[in-house]
């Protein structure tokens, strides 16, 4: 994983907070996504999909999330002008589309989805 500078992370969090100051639930959802990712309860493609969906339409925040991605992963804007970004991952040629709708099922042993979905899975 590339080295994450604390200053970069804090600056990005400030951008999210300022952008969604009137919608604190979005900021809180982002923090939940990051906690889930850090605990390895979701994989890198899962966190990319969740953040891209949460910040859909805000190119600056979607692309800014590259700061948090492991080496070899990269979110990009498609050249065709599509509203949904794409991402690259190590060992895979081409780009993977991030499309609206439910994400594909996670690999075995990996929990995907938000805290509400995880609670439902545990019940």
Image (spheres, rainbow, N blue to C red):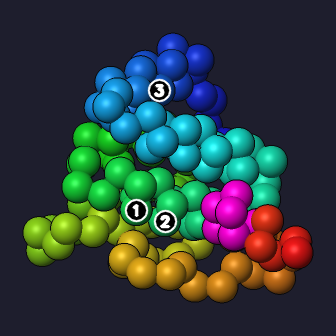
Marks 1 and 2: in contact by CB < 8 Å?
Answer: yes
Marks 1/3: CA–CA distance: 17 Å
Task: Mark yes or no: residue 15 visible.
Answer: no
The range drawn in magenta is 113-118
Residue found 41% across the figure and 21% down from its top: 14
Q: Residue at position x 50%, y 81% from top?
A: 102
Q: Quadrant of the C terminus?
A: bottom right
Q: Which mark is residue 53?
A: 1
- Which residue is under mark 3? 13
Residue 49 got which mark? 2
User: Could you tell me residue 96's position as x and y percent?
Assistant: 42, 76
Which residue ends up furthest to the top in the rendered image? 7
User: From the viewer's perspective, is 63 left or right of 101?
Assistant: left
Question: Percent position (x, y) of residue 109?
Answer: 86, 76
Q: Mark 1 or mark 3: which comes first in sequence?
A: 3
Quarter of the image with the N terminus is: top right
Q: Position of residue 59 (x, y in %)?
A: 24, 48
Nearest to the observer: residue 117 or residue 48: 117
Secondary structure state at the residue bearing disc 3: helix
Q: Is residue 7 left or right of residue 118?
A: left
Q: Judge whether 69 appears above or below 119 on screen.
A: above
Query: Residue 27: which disc?
Result: none
**Helix, strand or loop under label 2:** helix
What residue do we see at 77% from left, 73% from top? 120
The image position of residue 53, as x and y in percent, is 40, 62
Crowding around mark 1 (Cα neighbors within 10 Å: few <14, some 14 to 19, many 20+) is some
Whole-angstrom CA distance, mark 2 to mark 1, is: 6 Å
Task: Assign a secondary structure to mark 1.
Answer: helix
């Amino acid at each position: 994983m590339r080295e994450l500078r604390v200053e970069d992370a804090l600056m990005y969090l400030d951008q999210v907070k300022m952008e969604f100051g009137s919608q604190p639930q979005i900021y809180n959802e982002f923090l939940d996504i990051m906690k889930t990712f850090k605990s390895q309860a979701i994989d890198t493609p899962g966190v990319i999909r969740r953040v891209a969906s949460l910040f859909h339409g805000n190119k600056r925040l979607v692309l800014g999330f590259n700061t948090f991605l492991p080496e070899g992963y990269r979110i990009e804007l498609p050249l065709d002008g599509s509203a949904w970004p794409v991402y690259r991952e190590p060992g895979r040629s081409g780009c993977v589309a991030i499309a609206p709708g439910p994400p594909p099922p996670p690999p075995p042993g990996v929990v995907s989805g938000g805290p509400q979905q995880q609670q439902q899975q545990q019940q």
